Image: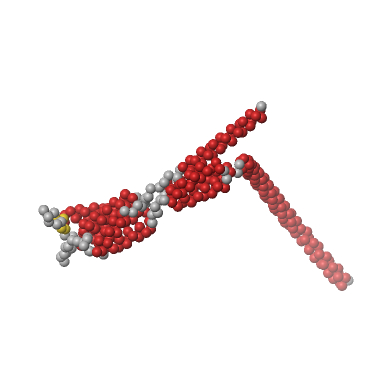
Amino acid sequence: MILLAIGVAFFGWQAWQKLEAQQQRLASLPADVASQSALGDLQGKLESAESERNAALDSAISDLRGEFADYRGSVDETLDKVLDELSREQDTDERDWLHAEAAYLLRLANQRLQLERDVEGAAALLRTADARLLEADNPALMPVRREIASELAALQSVPKVDRTGLYLALNAQQEQIAGQPLAQDIEEITGDATIEEAPTGGWQEQLSRFGNELKDLVTVRKHDQALEALIGPEQESYLRQSVRLVLEQSQLALLKEEQDLYEASLDKVLTLIRGYYDTDVEGVQSVISRLEELKQRSIRPELPDISGSQQALATFIEHRFESRAAGQASGGQGDDA
């Protein structure tokens, strides 16, 4: 009986353990089910959001494709119209294009000569325009080509100005005169003399100030007595600097093609050299001779008028279109009749 009771108790205990484990699993089952349900809801929302995003992206891409197609269609339509117009104009007469190009080149040649004074550039444009008219092969263009030939000959006769060579020549004279002696004696400066400040201001201001100082140093003697002046080191520096500045002014006038300023600057330099340098020295005489020669150079030669060919071609084109319009009008009237 005891053994039977022990056995019954043992099996009862095992059954109780199994029952308790099943109850625990049953208790945890709602939580697992709830978690799986929440996870399923979240996954559903994500899938829905992704679907909406993909749909919006597809819609935007579709709209862009539609707009691009419309724009491309508009561009193609405009291009077709332009090509049709050009084709109709070309079908009218291909030589009209050559006439228009030649007229444009002749206009450029006139502008190049008048505004930039570029003789070589203007001549090149005239030759190119003549080549276009030759290609047009129209005997009626002979007067225009005759004008072009005359204008090319006129341009070839324009004296060529070597501005670089003239500029370097003026620069060489500036270096040459810098080492030449003055005709006047140099005043001795005592040890306790004060040194004036360095010259300031532009070259015109310095030249004017130097002229005023020279007036105080010049002594005029009566009858046949020579004009003498006593120049100190500062005045000598002013004088040499003034000569250099005026020569630089002549170089600037050369580059700007200002003939009057060029000649006036060289006249001023020659006056300073003859008045204050020792003209008995061979180097000074050489500078004076060279500057006199350079002053005679024309840095702004007179340019010919090359507008005749442009006007002649414009008249030809105008008459050509008038004749064509008159022919079309008479043809239309004949059809109506």
Quadrant for residue 321, please give it.
top right
Depicted 247 relative to depicted 133: above or below: below
**Picture quarter with the N terminus:** bottom right
Q: Residue at x 40, y 51 (%)?
A: 158
Q: Residue at x 46, y 46 (%)?
A: 150
Q: Residue at x 37, y 59 (%)?
A: 165
Count of picture labels: 0
Which residue is outermost to the top? 337
Which residue is outermost to the left? 222
**Residue 249: x, y in percent?**
31, 54
Can residue 279 be spotted in the picture? Answer: yes
Depicted 119 relative to depicted 176: above or below: above
Front in this rendered view, residue 67 or 55: 67
**Residue 51: x, y in percent?**
71, 50
Q: How is the image coloured?
A: secondary structure
On screen, residue 59 versus residue 320, left or right, reads right
Quadrant for residue 83, please give it.
top right
Which residue is outermost to the bottom? 3
Front in this rendered view, residue 304 or 141: 141
Front in this rendered view, residue 174 or 5: 174
Quadrant for residue 21, please give it.
bottom right
**Residue 286: x, y in percent?**
27, 62
On screen, residue 135 versus residue 177, left or right, reads right
**Residue 168: x, y in percent?**
35, 60
On screen, residue 7 versus residue 177, left or right, reads right
**Picture quarter with the C terminus:** top right
Q: Residue at x 61, y 41 (%)?
A: 93
Can residue 30 be spotted in the picture? Answer: no
